[in-house]
Image: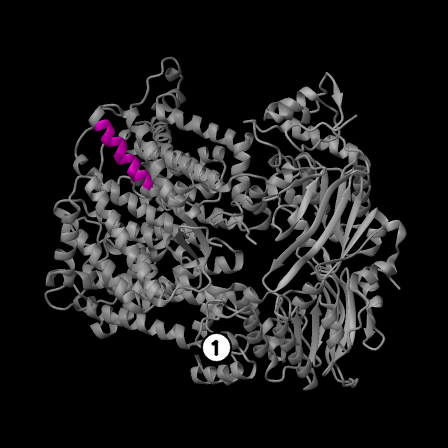
Amino acid sequence: MGKSYIGGYKPAIGVENISRDTLAARAGGRAVEFLRILGGERPGGAVSFQQPVPGEEILGASGIRKEFPGVVANDGVDLKVRAGEIHALLGENGAGKTTLVKILYGVYRPDGGDITLGGERVEINSPRDARDLGIGMVHQHFMLSEPNSVAENIALGLPAGRVLFPEEEVKGRIRDFSKVYGLKLDPDAKVWQLSAGEKQKIEILKALLAGARMLILDEPTAVLTPLETEELFSALRLMAEEGKAVIFITHKLDEVLNLAHQVTVLRKGRIVGNVKTSETDRRKLANMMVGVDLFPSKRSRSIEQGNTVLEVTGLCVKGDRGNRACSGISFKIQAGEILGLAGVAGNGQRELVEVLTGLRETESGGISVLGRDVTNSGPREIANLGVSYIPEDRLSIGIVPEMTVSENLVLRKFWQEEFSEGLLLDEERVRDYSREMIEEFDIVTPGPDTPVRKLSGGNIQRLILARETSGGPRLIIASHPTSGLDVKAANDIRKRLAQAADEGSSVLLDSEDLEEIFELSDRIAVIVNGEFVGVLARAEANLEKVGLLMGGAVE
Amino acid sequence: MTMVEEALFILHRTIAFGTPLLLGTLGEIVAERAGILNLGVEGMMSVGAVVAFGVSLYTGNAWLGVLIAAISVGLLSLIHSFASINLRANQVVSGLALTMLGLGISGLLGKSFVGRTPGGTIEPLDLPVLEDIPYLGKVIFNQDLLVYISLGIAVFTWLVIWKTRIGLNIRVSGENPAAADVSGINVYRIRHLAVFYGGMLAGMAGAYLSLAYIPAWTEGLTGGRGWIVIGLTIFAFWSPLRAIICSYLFGLFYVLPYSLQPLGIHVSLLQSMPYLFTIIALLAISRESIRKRMGSPGALGKSYVREEI
Amino acid sequence: MTGLRQAIPRITVRRRKQPLTSRESLTLILASVAAGIFLGGLLFSLAGVNPLYAYGKILQGSFGSIQGWKEILRKAIPLIMAGAGLAIAFRAVFWNIGAEGQMLAGATGATWVALNFTTAPGYILIPAMFAVGFVMGAALCIIPALLKSKFSVNEVIITLMLNYVALQIVTFLIDGPWKGETQHGYPYTDPFVQGARIPRIPGTFIHYPTLIIAVLASIGLFYFMKRTKAGYEIKVTGSSPKAARYAGISYARTLVMVAIISGGLAGMAGVGEVAGIHGKLLYPEYVSAGYGFTAIIVAWLARLHPAGVIASGIFMSGILVGGDAMRIRVPLSSVNIFTGLILLMLVSTEIFRTYEIKFSREDVP
């Protein structure tokens, strides 16, 4: 049976066979017909398949380029996905996977390159366009309305046309979905009662009902239990067998080898490999993911033991979604040591850092700084012990946008004797201190009374660095300190961190930039799924080992 | 009057008193369900009252007055929705500004209306047979048409909110506008629509006040009912059907004092009940378990801006 | 057709890269106020009243005459007092809509003092009334502050509802236990003794001690925000709650602090009204008289600068007095057209602080 397109590329709906008449009616915009089909009516008349021939290329992206201020997210990326194929996108964060996928889904427009769908060149200018073209996206952060039921949320994705809520049809579709793909959903359950895995099923069904022929999933297993993961994989395999295409983003090597037919590996915005999964293995994938460049260490001192600044034992932390973000983490940091925390974002680093800075509570376990127990202490107590924090979220936690440079420079110290006179702030001292900091850290600003909003990103980070690394802190917790910065600013910051460590401060470096970790760390801890899967001394560590650990491989 | 007669009289008046509260609340429920907090109800009801009165004065037709009041207040409320939605103004302040504006406009327009009697008024209906049902007949079936219309609107509103696609779109726009937006719903348009609906009903409520009670216009006719409506919306947990009972309950708090006064219970005690009840309802929904089931719409009062790159 | 296309200006809306300068900001405010006044005049003309009459009255009867200024200063007292407190509360993003009720609470406290300590001399009574009034207003405001910080309850609705609870309490008191013997059955308390009356400038209603306190409070709060640690914490909390947490600032403590300040000041404004103007507790609507709501405009107009409320308080007072002057021709409530439109314009034009609109002939990149 040949393909028959009416009015351009049109997606097939579900697994029904659709008659030409019905297709014509639908192309004419008759939503009622459409809904009858969704409701399961089997139309009479001639039958023609809308299914593509397995193996034929559905999606072709070539030369995709996307730039953001200061960084090239995608640099000449090619991607080919075939019908019936499960295609994995592998890479560390910052590699460009999410950007590429957002381009495919119409959230971003590429600065260069073409996208073809079914052989025809297409422009995807909005998520609506993407949906009309049959591209469905299952977001990492669910776009669901909590107090509403499953059926209501799914109905949102249906095309308009009926006044009354199509209750029976929606419930019918949900039942069909459950039967065909084995993903069970209770149509009447309220979304707030569901687990993350079930919410994901709703997103998948929404995408399918909107007519998706190609499904994109962004790190789908991040929130799933092992059982749910298996259910998801079976469902995806079934969809592939039907002729749909699946793209999924992951950093887990085992998943790639288990589920995908084809894998494209991205690093720093470029393609570094595109292979059949049957022709590769974990080692090769890990190498592709992190590269084999040598990053020489810039650290020259050796660390004396016995001078523990931070000790964490058996730390368990609950995440925002009720999941276990950190499980039984234990480690020590010595004075003057830099411990690098390597891992793909979303594996518990954020929660760990939040607990260590007093912004989150622990479930169990202990934290002590310089021998003092600070488990579940508040941010001010921890700061008073000499712990500083360079937050990942600079603009909403690191600074107060509406205040001046000098006011921001004392954000973590203003209550201390040095800066206060009783109830008052010692304005003169604050200003002197600001001038010192501005000078010492090369913060480019018209003056200490400039609103901090006017500073560039790099200078804001220098401000934060000044605040957090001056005065000889015992422990500096640095979270993604150089992300989004230009090369000079990034280098300055790394130099400063190394210098602080030389001067005796310890550093916990949470970064996705492996080059940075290798450059600065004395020891490297790899965190996967909230656990430290390995802690390597810098001398023993190489990219391959770390890459494998990050990818979930257990040595 | 005997005790029974007095009780029935109270019930009769309660329904009449609760009707403008019900109308106002239904409108505010829809607006808030879509995510827009409209504190301008007091001003809007006032404008509705003066417009309806004026129309009835010049045309002798009360129902024309109701209709024009509804439309004009609906349009007036679009000022608030335009400021809040398109200009992303602070909804609390914008709503308060609308109240002031509405009170000012109604005072100005109504200057020449004071002391006059309109041609058309809203009179209680005489429903044969039904009226003669002992006891409740006179209570329930001797009300004016707008009472029955208000009940009809309550049911209609409930149907729309819970059983239609538009209602679902409204609810999701107020709960998680990003989810609605991603599904292709025009969140701005839905919110404008919801606020307009709210304005229309507030206008009708105002019309009732000036044409049904003692048909008259004075400054301050609304007497704070707009604020009660805002509290009622919460007390009824944003449910149109619950609003019926809650409106009559709050109406009772206004009718009852005059009967209880001889017993030494001060008017103020009962008249502060609506506000206290609202506060208690607010405390109730702050509990996690209740909030998920019947709490306020998640995005209430927050401007929605599509996440840009 | 290209000629036609080019004739239509392109409108580009863009996020501003630099915030407005002080001059631009002031221009925006003045333009908004002017727009509000202009639109108000428009509405007046649509209602058949010559707008120039209204403007003339506002200028002549209010800003343009000595008698007008006497009234302006009188009405400005509660506006400045409450407005300064609200500016602080709003800075912490605590929407205190309950200033009306807090004024009544303060007035009630003062009345209690005045009625129960009739023999005490003025130099004890008056400070005592202010102190009690402050405490009462603050107490009323602390309730929503605690509820917000502990249970995330919406403070807008609670403060709003408490207004009317306070109103009912006052109504009860003046008609019941505190009803004056000498008032011929009217629901007023007995008049306060001379010692409990705040002195006025002779020939006017200006109760100058309250005015002095209001101005001092306003200037004091300016320094409070600028120089104290508490002021710093309030600014951080209002600007960026996450950063505030990171800086170890206690949200509950900050909210309670602004509640005490704004509730207390509103309470004192109520004391001024009842002991400086009326000399007795009477209908609550006469005591708070919409000052609590107008104070919101005063604070907003001053862009939440506590010292700026002196200027904006006098300005809004002038508008209100103009409304009084118009009374012969238009009802008193019509002045709300101007106040409402001014507030509306102020709040609607804030978007221009974040975005700029450019008109151009070609496409702007």
Q: Main secondary structure of the magenta part?
A: helix
Q: Is residue A385 above or below residue A53?
A: below
Given residues A112 and B185, the one toward you in this image is: A112
Residue reaching furthest top?
B129
The quarter holding residue A32 reads top right
Given residues A50 and A517, the one toward you in this image is: A50
Coordinates of residue A139 in the picture (x, y in percent): 67, 48
The amino acid type found where label 1 is placed reads Ser
Relative to A128, B104 lies left or right: left
Relative to C81, A143 lies left or right: right
How many neighbours does mark 1 have within 10 angstroms: few (below 14), some (14-19), or many (20 or more)? many
Relative to C10, B47 lies left or right: left
| Magenta extent | B44-57
Q: Name the chain letter of the residue that bears numbered label 1.
A: A
Coordinates of residue A476 in the picture (x, y in percent): 66, 77
* SS of the residue under disc 1: helix
Judge whether residue A258 can be spotted in this image.
Answer: yes
Coordinates of residue A172 in the picture (x, y in percent): 70, 28
Judge whether residue A219 can be spotted in this image.
Answer: no
The residue pinned by badge 1 equals A406
Who's the residue at 49% across and 58% down the image?
Answer: C148
State yes or no: residue B240 in magenta: no
Q: Is residue B178 above or below residue C249?
A: above
Query: What colouring method underlies this structural image?
Result: one colour
Q: Quadrant of the N terminus of chain C?
A: top left
The quarter holding residue C91 reads bottom left
Who's the residue at 43% across and 60% down the image?
Answer: C94
Relative to A234, B300 lies left or right: left
Coordinates of residue C23 in the picture (x, y in percent): 33, 66
Who's the residue at 78% across and 33% down the image?
Answer: A180
Q: Is residue A63 above or below residue A187?
A: below
